[in-house]
């Protein structure tokens, strides 16, 4: 407010009297206007009155004469003599000299030194309002809580530092220390270690680049609190243990004894502080840190390493012979124990005997029924085959091989044995033993066993005297055991356990394997009881074969699986082989070589290696070797029967394409 | 000389030197530079050019002769550089090429029709004898005329062999699946046959027969794994047992000796001299027996069952065929190194019969279940010399006792006769 000056007050400054009040000032100005005679012409350029001796008129109308001005000499004299010369100023409006007062001079000086003109004005008399004081006030300036970052280490700074650290670790940024060392190195002659794998620099850098952080200490738990809940304190037993382990303090669960104090005041100084820190430092210093190499296990390593088929030779690889001659599907084959002849039975109601080495059909015998199963008597002293034709089991003398044996067999069979006891009614209803008619005798048929239902399978016992037949429709009378020497049959089972699929004799011990649709039961024939029941977890079992050693069984099922049972191991399958794409109809073991084969409806014959070890600890090794798919596509069926040659690593398969094929 | 050089390409060259054992075809000794990819055909032309003067007869007509070339003991069948790399021989130095007149290809001559599979065949001089699956034996002339058929066996005849042939009569022996061996006598003029003796002793089918070179004894082997040696003398009577006389006056004779040793079927037997025999069996072994004492001299063990074998005294090696499709050559006299001296693979199925040439030390024939008969040279293991086609079914037996005729019998009921033009006059 002091800054604004009234418009009319150009030439004269207001008097030095304090004029705080503007109204008062204005009033003074207004009153002095009438008396002020100094300026009577107004605000005009004074050069208009240069020619005239006067400047303006006074109230009486008289001319106001300009004061006399001295010349330069007078000026000079004035300067010398007049002590107030330096304060004398010429007022341009009125043309008169004005002597400035002290106050005026002081004012001018203050202005020139850029101070506030008013000397009495106290610039700093205003009270200072501290907006942001260092005193902690009751009420905060702002209404929110301070951010955490205001009292925590700055995150951005940490990021920058982290970035620098990363670059240094990567070697992209050099620390000052490094630069200095480099400069020094450049100056001096450098020697290289020719044979060292890492120099000092590398070791130094490795601590930075491959940094393994120190192991963290455990955070304090409740037991370490100054007032833990009472359950954390040691009871007597724990105290005793703690004292006992004084010699071996690293074995203790806690390295301190939990103490309980009611308030923090009462907590004494921790006696072991320095020792603890020292041990920590020793740990850091003495324990070298190394990275634990993690095990990288490829899934392929977990697969068992099977030997390659090349190592497991010999096994059949190519088809060598085709036996052509049957006019319908060939359902079953069997080889004579010496390996010279092959017997086959077919849907064309005949059986044929072939010479293996040439593929020549030597004999054809009509049997008057679809042949579902044939088996050559394993006894080498007899020349007999068992043939299943519908409801009849025919015992036939094939008439090939050694003449003496053939004739001996005939002589044995022509004389019926003496019947010691009567045949029971139950058995009579099921099967009847008949001699062959003379025409049948010509063909080679010696004995006919008429069963009451259709027979599906026949199998011989190893000695050649007993034969077992399976009639699936027979319910509890499905399985029959016949004895050739006495011409008697037996019904071993009283109860039906399911649809019987297949029956096998154990090669060595007196066991009978009976396969129903889902399980296999092993019966001890001497003790006449169930020995074991094997769970197959398959929907429908089709065929079985037993290893010549007698401890392993292989089962083929209609749901494309082959199960290997190790009888010593467990009643569950040892291995389940899913090698085929359709139902497995027939399986077989080789008597000498560790081979087994399976034939299925997709005409594939798969030969596999099945090595059984004498060492009881080692499990059998099963390796699939070769897929032989030579049978032709003919109807939905594929291979019906599979059998191995007794001595050579050859396999025979018979199928729906009316052929039998030999693979060697 | 310039004309031969014109054939040379701008490619790499090999220096070759020609040598030959046949003096009438000798060429100058100095080496020739030929294209490295040169084949048999071009070498043939080269040699023919070189021999132009020698080969032309008086009228100036040049007779072209086919030559076969041997490089490093093997017949040249591929381009020369491939042949050399296969044998690991550098082509830097002079390559010695031996040449000889090529074997002319056998000519199919005749086809003898039978009623059933022909399972055994043997020729001697002017007669051919065959054994058939219909239990009969037939005798033919070399020209293919059927002389006589003999029945008597009750099982398929698996083996036949001539014992002795003269102008008036001949004796032969046959073995069959009915476990018996019959010695027959054939009166050529009258045309009648007479069974002199029946040999019983085998417990199972008889598979093979071999007559000793002096025609005094013969040996048989069969499915009962026994090797039996019999006397070929019609009047033979063992010292201890008098021969039984059957109603038909055919004497039954026992064997002189029975040799045990094999574990499986003896598929092939052969006398190599008057006292030693070689047998091959399905138990994967070949045994060399001493016929006098009845003991085994040496044994060769293989991997597969042997189906047939033949021994040649020209080179002392045994050629065998097995239940795989390869023919293997064994040398009985060698003691070190691998036993198999050569493997010949060209058949696609089982090989059932092999026979050496009686005059050439390098040639043999083989026949197998792939319906083919092949003529091989032992110096060319991958490719046979000739393939004698004709059979429509499996070849079951073959014979090359008569050097002019290569015979083979098969399951197509025929015997095929091929004429061998490479006849050496001894």
Image (cartoon, rainbow, N blue to C red):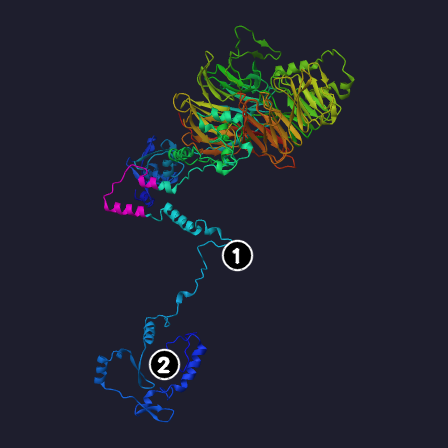
Residue B231 can be seen in this image: no
Residue B27 lies in quadrant: top left
Q: Which residue corresponds to mark 2?
A: A12
Q: Is residue B157 left or right of residue A255?
A: right
Q: Which mark is residue A143?
A: 1
- Report x, y in % for residue A213: 42, 39
- Closer-to-camera residue (B158/A398): A398
- Closer-to-camera residue (A238/B100): A238
Q: In this view, does B222 lie to the left or right of A16?
A: right
Circle 1: element type: loop
Magenta highlight on residue A177: yes
Residue A551 can be seen in this image: yes
For mark 2, name the chain: A
Tell me the crowding category of disc 2: few under 14, some 14 to 19, or many 20 or more residues within 10 angstroms, Cα based.
few
For mark 1, name the chain: A
A513 shown above or below B31: above
**Same subunit under labels 2 and 1?**
yes
Q: Give the range drawn in magenta.
A: A176-204
Which numbered disc, 2 or 1, marks the residue that appears first in the sequence?
Answer: 2
Q: Gap in Å between the C-alphas at discs 2 and 1?
A: 56 Å
- Closer-to-camera residue (B259/B376): B259
Q: Quadrant of the N terminus of chain A?
A: bottom left
Q: Which mark is residue A218?
A: none
Q: In which quarter of the image is the C terminus of chain A?
A: top right
- Report x, y in % for residue B349: 52, 31
B262 shown above or below A39: above
Circle 2: element type: loop
- Closer-to-camera residue (B108/A126): A126
Magenta highlight on residue A321: no
Tell me the crowding category of disc 1: few under 14, some 14 to 19, or many 20 or more residues within 10 angstroms, Cα based.
few
- Report x, y in % for residue B406: 48, 28
């Amino acid at each position: 407010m002091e800054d604004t000056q009234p418009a009319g007050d150009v030439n004269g400054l207001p008097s030095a009297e304090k004029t705080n009040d503007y109204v008062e000032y204005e009033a003074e100005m207004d009153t002095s206007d009438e008396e002020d005679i100094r300026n009577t012409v107004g605000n005009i350029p004074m050069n208009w009155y240069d020619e005239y001796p006067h400047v303006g008129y006074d109230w009486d109308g008289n001319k106001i004469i300009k004061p006399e001005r001295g010349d330069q000499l007078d000026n000079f004299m004035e300067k010398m003599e007049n002590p107030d010369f330096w304060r004398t100023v010429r007022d341009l409006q009125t043309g008169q000299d004005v002597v400035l007062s002290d106050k005026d001079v002081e004012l001018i000086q203050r202005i020139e030194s850029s101070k506030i003109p008013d000397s009495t004005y106290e610039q700093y008399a205003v009270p200072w309002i501290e907006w942001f004081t260092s005193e902690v006030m009751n009420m905060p300036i702002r209404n929110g809580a301070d951010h955490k970052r205001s009292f925590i280490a700055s995150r951005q700074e940490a990021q920058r530092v982290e970035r620098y650290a990363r670059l240094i670790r990567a070697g992209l940024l050099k620390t000052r220390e490094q630069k200095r060392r480099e400069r020094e190195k450049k100056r001096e002659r450098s020697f290289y270690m020719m044979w060292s794998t890492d120099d000092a620099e590398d070791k130094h850098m490795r601590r930075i680049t491959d940094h393994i952080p120190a192991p963290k200490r455990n955070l304090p738990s409740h037991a370490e609190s100054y007032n833990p809940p009472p359950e954390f304190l040691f009871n007597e037993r724990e105290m005793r243990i703690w004292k006992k382990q004084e010699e071996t303090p690293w074995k203790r669960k806690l390295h301190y004894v939990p103490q309980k104090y009611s308030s923090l005041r009462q907590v004494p100084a921790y006696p072991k502080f320095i020792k603890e820190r020292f041990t920590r430092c020793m740990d850091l210093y003495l324990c070298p840190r190394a990275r634990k190499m993690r095990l990288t296990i490829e899934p392929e390593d977990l697969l068992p390493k099977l030997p390659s088929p090349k190592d497991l030779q010999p096994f059949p690889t190519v088809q060598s012979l085709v036996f052509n001659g049957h006019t319908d599907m060939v359902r079953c084959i069997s080889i004579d124990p010496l390996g010279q002849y092959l017997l086959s039975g077919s849907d064309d109601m005949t059986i044929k005997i072939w010479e293996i080495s040439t593929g020549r059909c030597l004999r054809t015998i009509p049997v008057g029924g679809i042949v579902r199963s044939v088996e050559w008597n394993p006894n080498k002293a007899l020349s007999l085959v068992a043939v299943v034709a519908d409801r009849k089991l025919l015992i036939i003398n094939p008439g090939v091989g050694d003449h003496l044996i053939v004739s001996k067999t005939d002589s044995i069979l022509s004389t019926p044995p003496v019947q010691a006891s009567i045949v029971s009614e139950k058995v009579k209803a099921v099967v009847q033993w008949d001699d062959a008619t003379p025409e049948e005798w010509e063909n080679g048929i010696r004995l006919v066993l008429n069963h009451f239902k259709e027979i599906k399978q026949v199998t011989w016992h190893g000695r050649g005297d007993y034969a077992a037949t399976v009639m699936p429709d027979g319910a509890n009378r499905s399985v029959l055991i016949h004895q050739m020497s006495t011409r008697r049959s037996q019904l071993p089972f009283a109860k039906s356990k399911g649809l019987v699929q297949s029956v096998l004799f154990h090669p060595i011990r007196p066991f009978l394997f009976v396969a129903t649709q889902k399980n296999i039961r092993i019966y001890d024939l001497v003790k006449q009881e169930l020995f074991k029941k094997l769970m197959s977890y398959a929907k429908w079992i089709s065929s079985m074969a037993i290893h010549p050693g007698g401890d392993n069984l292989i089962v083929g099922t209609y749901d494309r699986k082959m199960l290997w049972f190790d009888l010593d191991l467990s009643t569950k399958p040892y291995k389940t082989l899913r090698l085929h794409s359709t139902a497995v109809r027939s399986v077989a073991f080789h008597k000498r070589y560790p081979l087994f084969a399976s034939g299925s409806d997709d005409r594939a014959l798969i030969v596999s290696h099945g090595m059984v070890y004498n060492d009881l600890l080692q499990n059998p090794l099963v390796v699939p070797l070769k897929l032989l798919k030579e049978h032709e596509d003919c109807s939905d069926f594929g291979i019906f029967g599979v059998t191995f040659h007794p001595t050579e690593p050859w396999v025979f398969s018979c199928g729906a394409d009316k052929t039998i094929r030999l693979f060697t | 000389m310039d004309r031969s050089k014109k054939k040379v390409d701008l490619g790499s060259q090999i220096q070759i030197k020609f040598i030959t054992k046949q003096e009438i075809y000798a060429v100058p000794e100095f080496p020739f530079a030929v294209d490295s990819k040169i084949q048999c055909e071009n070498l043939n032309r080269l040699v023919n050019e070189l021999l132009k003067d020698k080969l032309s007869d008086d009228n100036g007509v040049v007779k072209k002769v086919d030559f076969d070339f041997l490089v490093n003991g093997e017949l040249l069948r591929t381009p020369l550089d491939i042949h050399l790399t296969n044998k690991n021989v550098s082509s830097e130095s002079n390559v010695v090429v031996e040449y000889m007149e090529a074997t002319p290809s056998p000519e199919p001559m005749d086809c003898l029709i039978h009623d059933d599979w022909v399972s055994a065949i043997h020729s001697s001089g002017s007669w051919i004898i065959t054994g058939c699956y219909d239990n009969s034996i037939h005798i033919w002339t070399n020209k293919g005329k059927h002389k006589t058929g003999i029945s008597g066996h009750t099982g398929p005849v698996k083996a036949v062999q001539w014992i002795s042939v003269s102008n008036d009569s001949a004796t032969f022996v046959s073995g069959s699946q009915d476990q018996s061996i019959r010695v027959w006598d054939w009166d050529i003029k009258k045309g009648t046959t007479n069974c002199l003796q029946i040999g019983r002793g085998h417990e199972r089918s008889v598979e093979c027969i071999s007559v000793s070179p002096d025609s005094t004894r013969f040996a048989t082997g069969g499915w009962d794994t026994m090797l039996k040696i019999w006397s070929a003398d019609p009047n033979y009577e063992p010292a201890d047992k008098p021969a039984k006389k059957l109603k038909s006056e055919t004497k039954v004779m026992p064997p002189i000796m029975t040799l045990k040793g094999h574990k499986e079927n003896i598929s092939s037997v052969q006398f190599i001299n008057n006292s030693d025999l070689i047998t091959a069996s399905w138990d994967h072994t070949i045994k060399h027996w001493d016929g006098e004492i009845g003991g085994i001299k040496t044994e060769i063990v293989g991997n597969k069952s042997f189906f047939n074998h033949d021994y040649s005294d020209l080179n002392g090696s045994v050629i065998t065929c097995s239940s795989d499709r390869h023919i293997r050559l064994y040398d009985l006299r060698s003691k070190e190194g691998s036993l198999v001296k050569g493997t010949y693979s060209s058949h696609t199925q089982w090989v059932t019969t092999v026979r050496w040439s009686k005059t050439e030390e390098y040639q043999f024939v083989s026949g197998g279940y792939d319906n083919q008969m092949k003529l091989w040279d032992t110096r060319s293991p991958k490719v046979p010399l000739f393939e004698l086609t004709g059979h429509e079914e499996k070849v079951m037996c073959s014979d090359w006792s008569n050097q002019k005729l290569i015979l083979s019998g098969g399951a197509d009921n025929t015997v095929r006769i091929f004429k061998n033009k490479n006849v050496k006059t001894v």
